[in-house]
Image (cartoon, helix red, strand yellow):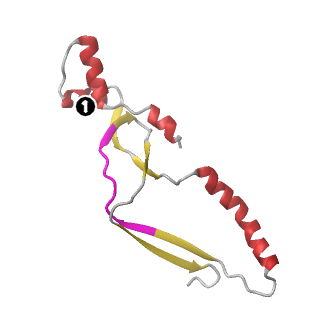
Amino acid sequence: MQSSQESQAKVVHVEIIKNLILKNNGKKFSRSGIYSFCKKIGLRKVKLRPVHVKNDPEVIAGCRKNFPKVIEKVKREHPDKKIIQYYQEETSYGQKTITSGIWSPKGVRPEYKIKHCILNSWIYGTINIDTGK
């Protein structure tokens, strides 16, 4: 999978193409004409893939790597207690950012940073990995 910066470098906005054609050839084309041109040169219109602003792959990898060590440390510090692990999941329902399609080469799915902060409700759930409840 390509990084966000690599995919953003391959994004083509229709207005940019339209202005380049006007500047270089002095011709005006309709939006549908530009769309036809984009299809002919191998571009396709796609929706951007949302990525949360706090999504940092390095931080996530560090947490996954250090998690067993943290559990062992807690067990050592509390040998008289039973350690129960719970996993949490959360989901958001509500108003989300709406994006329009953009043109990019086939095989490229650009990402953009978003932050849902308007009229959202969060639902949390946990599960005990020992009992499944």
Q: In which quarter of the image is residue 123?
A: bottom left
Position of residue 106 relative to residue 34, above or below, is below
Q: Which amino acid does label 1 sit on?
A: Tyr
Density class for disc 1 (Cα within 10 Å; few <14, some 14-19, many ≥20) is some
Please report the bounds of the magenta region as a residue range: 91-102
Is residue 52 found left or right of 78 in the rendered image?
A: left
Q: Quadrant of residue 80?
A: bottom right
Question: Regarding mark 1 in the picture, which secondary structure is present there?
Answer: helix
Residue shown at 66% from the left, 60% from the top: 63
Position of residue 16 relative to residue 59, above or below, is above
Q: Does the magenta stretch include residue 94?
A: yes
Q: Quadrant of residue 119?
A: bottom left
Residue shown at 44% from the left, 32% from the top: 10
* Image quarter (top left, top right, bottom left or bottom right) of the C terminus: bottom right
Position of residue 84 relative to residue 48, above or below, is below
Residue shown at 38% from the left, 45% from the top: 48
What is the x, y in percent for residue 29? 19, 23
110, 122: nearer the viewer: 122
Position of residue 10 relative to residue 89, above or below, is above
Q: Is residue 80 magenta?
A: no
